[in-house]
Image (spheres, grey):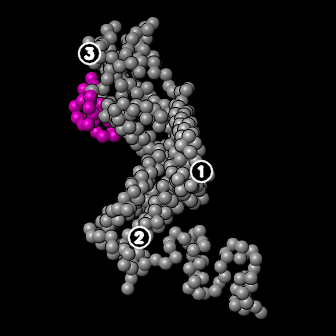
């Protein structure tokens, strides 16, 4: 009868296991650090984090929650794509099928919708938190700019997704939105034409919004988000300075 | 990135300038290739052929529309009016942000459901955010049938006398 201890010992000696996870299971501080250091999924945080940086009341985990809602939106969105044709009038019918006929369709559709609302709210709250913490101050000012880019991408994703149900709300919402683009002096007319792929909201517009919503904008968001998080790491993690004060607080660390 | 000087290469000035020259040539080639690709990509997204509805359509015989009536054609997004002075056509698309308006016969007014703009039955703004009256469209009599071109805007006083 093998005990858990012998099983883990054998696992540690297994070549396949060791090729994936190079560290053994030895429960030492050094090994724990190395395990985090050498793991793609864990290295979103540094190996050692200031305890003040991970206090809930410092960040309310708003950035992480926004990223988590994005993950939910990607997963539910991919599921919705299996039943959705971006064509007229199939789009509306598929949306109705998802709501009434598809197993778990209403759950996925509602989760996608509420996730989208939550993501916009969380991104805005995250920006408010960063603003009041003064974390946009040098040397992090460009990361604030990246944050604004991410906010714009989030709103554009929301807006392009708004057309896809192809109902009255979607149709007139996008009519109004593209006419706002039309109002821009000079280029507005061309921007509207390019967005819609024509002169009115029709099947060309639906397909364009679909491609933007499902491929183009999510890719740009992942790119911008990667740089955003990477820069937080390179600037020494979560900003710990005093609001309105100097940056020296960050370097003092815990006693 | 190491600078050229850090490499301590045994280069004389002539060679340095050749390197600089090639750098400019390579940069220019890459830049113009990138610019060309960008322009081509945007141009690609410009549709060549559009499968959109015809903007000219036959409305009906003028004698079918008695004086003082407004005919609403939501599919074509136009109104045809037989007023005191004659026939005129106007767009049913709101001048605010492009929603489709509707004619409310009981109050003899045109109403936009998106942001509440209201127009008189001749197209003047009476309420709401619409910045200008509903423009009149070209209307003509062809072989006894009224024909409207929704793509051609005419002056707001033009009427067709039949």
Q: Which one is closest to the eye, mark 1 or mark 2?
A: 1
Q: Are marks 2 and 3 on the same chain?
A: no
Residue B5 as seen in the image, left or right of residue A13: left
What residue does disc 2 label? A238
In percent of width and height, residue B113 lies at 33, 39
Count the numbered circles shown.
3
Image quarter for residue A189? top left
Q: Which chain does the residue under circle 2 lie in?
A: A
Q: Which residues are magenta?
A: B106-132
Is A221 included in the stretch rendered in magenta? no
Q: Quadrant of the C terminus of chain B?
A: top left
Q: Mark 3 = which residue?
A: B157
Q: Outermost residue, left direction?
A: B126
| Disc 2 element | loop
Q: Secondary structure at mark 3?
A: loop
Where residue A109 appears, as percent x and y from the top left, is 52, 56
Q: Are marks 1 and 2 in contact (CB under 8 Å)?
A: no
**Residue B10 disc label:** 1
Spatial CA span between label 1 and label 3: 83 Å
Chain assignment, label 3: B
Which badge, 1 or 3, is on the more N-terminal residue?
1
Identified at 60% across, 73% down, the residue is: A38
Q: Are marks 2 and 3 in contact (CB under 8 Å)?
A: no
Disc 3 residue crowd, few under 14, some 14–19, many 20+, Cα 10 Å: few
Q: Is residue A111 visible?
A: no
The residue sitting at 38% across, 75% down in the picture is: A251
In-front residue for pair A93/A214: A214
Q: CA distance from mark 1 to mark 2?
A: 47 Å
**The quarter of the displayed image where residue A211 is located:** top right
């Amino acid at each position: 009868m093998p005990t858990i201890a012998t099983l883990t010992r054998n696992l540690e000696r297994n070549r396949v296991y060791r090729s994936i996870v190079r560290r053994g299971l030895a429960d030492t501080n050094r090994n724990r650090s190395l395990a985090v250091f050498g793991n793609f999924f864990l290295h979103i945080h540094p190996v050692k984090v200031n305890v003040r940086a991970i206090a809930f009341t410092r960040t309310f985990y708003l950035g992480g929650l926004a990223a988590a809602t994005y993950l939910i939106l990607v997963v539910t969105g991919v599921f919705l794509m299996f039943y959705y044709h971006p064509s007229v009038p199939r789009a509306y019918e598929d949306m109705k099928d998802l709501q009434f006929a598809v197993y778990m369709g209403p759950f996925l559709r509602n989760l996608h919708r509420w996730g989208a609302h939550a993501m916009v709210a969380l991104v805005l709250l995250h920006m408010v938190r960063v603003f009041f913490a003064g974390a946009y101050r040098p040397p992090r000012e460009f990361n604030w700019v990246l944050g604004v880019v991410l906010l714009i991408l989030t709103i554009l994703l929301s807006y392009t997704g708004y057309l896809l149900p192809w109902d009255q709300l979607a149709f007139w919402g996008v009519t109004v939105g593209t006419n706002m683009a039309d109002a821009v002096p000079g280029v507005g007319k061309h921007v509207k034409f390019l967005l819609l792929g024509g002169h009115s909201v029709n099947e060309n517009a639906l397909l364009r919004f679909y491609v933007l919503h499902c491929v183009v904008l999510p890719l740009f968001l992942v790119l911008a988000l990667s740089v955003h998080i990477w820069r937080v790491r390179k600037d020494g993690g979560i900003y710990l300075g005093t609001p309105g004060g100097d940056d020296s607080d960050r370097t003092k660390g815990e006693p | 990135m190491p600078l050229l000087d850090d490499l301590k290469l045994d280069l004389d000035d002539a060679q340095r300038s050749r390197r600089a020259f090639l750098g400019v040539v390579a940069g220019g080639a890459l830049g113009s290739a990138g610019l060309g690709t960008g322009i081509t990509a945007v141009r690609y997204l410009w549709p060549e052929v559009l499968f959109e509805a015809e903007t000219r359509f036959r409305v009906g015989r003028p004698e079918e529309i008695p004086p003082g009536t407004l005919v609403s054609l939501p599919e074509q997004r136009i109104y045809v009016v037989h007023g005191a002075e004659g026939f005129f056509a106007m767009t049913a698309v709101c001048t605010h942000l492009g929603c489709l308006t509707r004619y409310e016969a009981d109050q003899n007014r045109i109403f936009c459901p998106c942001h509440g703009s209201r127009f008189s039955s001749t197209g003047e703004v009476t309420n709401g955010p619409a910045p200008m009256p509903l423009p009149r469209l070209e209307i003509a009599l062809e072989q006894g049938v009224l024909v409207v071109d929704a793509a051609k805007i005419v002056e707001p006083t033009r009427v067709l006398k039949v």
